[in-house]
Amino acid sequence: MRVWALSGSVVLAVAGAGTAWADVKMSGTFVADSACPATQAIKSGKSPGDVSTQAGQSYQLLAGNKDEPTHYLIQVPGADPERRWVKIGCGHVTGGSASVAPSPAGLTKPSLPASGKPEYVFALSWQPAFCETKANKPECKAQSPNEFDATHFTLHGLWPQPNGNFYCQVPASDKANDNPAHWAELPAVKLDANTRAELEQVMPGTASKLERHEWIKHGTCYGKSQQEYFSDALNLMRAVNASPVRDLFNKNIGKQLTSDQIREAFDQAFGAGAGERVRVSCLVDPSSGRRLIGELTLGLSGPIGPDSKLGDLLMASAPTGKAGCPKGTVDAIGFQ
């Protein structure tokens, strides 16, 4: 006799000898390598709505069907039901861990190793430099020496990888409106009052509805709610802005920094080797020709949540290789 719970939360199989086992609960990301049927149940193979995975798209990984799985249980946003089974050969798993509910012998499944490749790119802006090239943006017109963005890193985005993993289950009409001139026409992002207030401080681009763009393009592929997506990003921002990295930038406003100095500050803040996961991007001030440090991008891997440590996420990812821009000026607030 076999009893299957179609929700996928618990799957029990009872053999003739009376031995029972539970499904393997997993966390992390399943990245589809091809289009494969996503079924409601393994045995029947039925797929309500004829749902299939999309090559290159990431899905939240929930479970495997046994210790050495033949199928993964994933969450497919927009499907009914959303929890679906796919064959393991359909894609690959990045990051996360797996554990088996205790067997009669009390054994547990060991953690799965992280793949090493970045599962996310975390992008931080130095807003004064950005505004030198975007003077007409509302957030740039409102710059002030007393505001947060004069002395802190600001949030650009948290981008699930691989590159090209965009617009998951997004209507064509929203994709068509995803350009800066039409961001106000994108659906509003629903956040609690505290998160909204913090986001408006840490992401000055909310004045241009940047958060709507970030959600539509990247957040829809994150596998969590809007509230969780932005809360996770803000938690990571707090860690950077409370670190020696921010201190380094504040002490050198109006001066130049090298990429080596920036990477060394990350090592100091988040552990030896953390800086190797950081890339520096520069831009040129069109009015003066100065080369300005505009953005830092961090490679991260592993599950991101309220208790995640930025240092752990950095070290779980592979080094980025070249540091990017070798040297640039830390721009002061206001137009130079």
Image: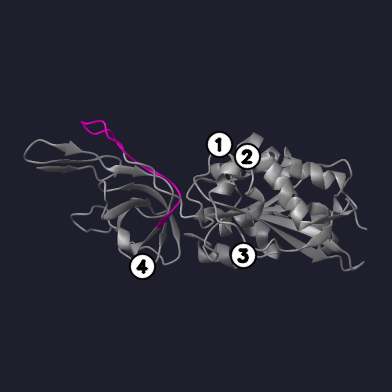
> Whole-Å distance between the Cαs marked 1 and 2?
7 Å
The scheme the figure's colours follow is one colour
Q: Main secondary structure of the magenta part?
A: loop
Mark 3 → mark 4, Cα distance in angstroms:
27 Å
Left or right, residue 110 beside residue 1: right
Q: Secondary structure at mark 2?
A: helix
Residue receiving disc 1:
306
Query: Label 1 is placed on what type of residue?
Result: Pro
Q: Nearer the viewer, residue 16 or 212?
A: 16
In the rendered image, residue 259 lying in the magenta stretch gets the answer: no
Q: Is residue 295 above or below residue 112?
A: below
Find disc 3 in the rendering and name its residue.
177
Q: Earlier in the sequence, mark 1 or mark 2?
A: 2
Reading the image, the residue beneath label 4 is 35
Q: Quadrant of residue 291?
A: bottom right
Alpha carbon of mark 1 to alpha carbon of mark 4: how far? 33 Å
Q: Which span is picked out in magenta?
A: 93-108
- What is the three-letter code of the residue carrying label 2? Asn
Q: CA distance from mark 3 to mark 2?
A: 29 Å
Nearer to us of marks 3 and 4 is: 4
* Crowd tier of the residue under label 3, counting other residues whose Cα lies within 10 Å: few below 14, some 14–19, many 20 or above: some
Per the image, label 3 sits on a secondary structure element best described as loop
Q: Which residue is mark 2?
A: 235
N-terminal-most mark, 1 or 4: 4
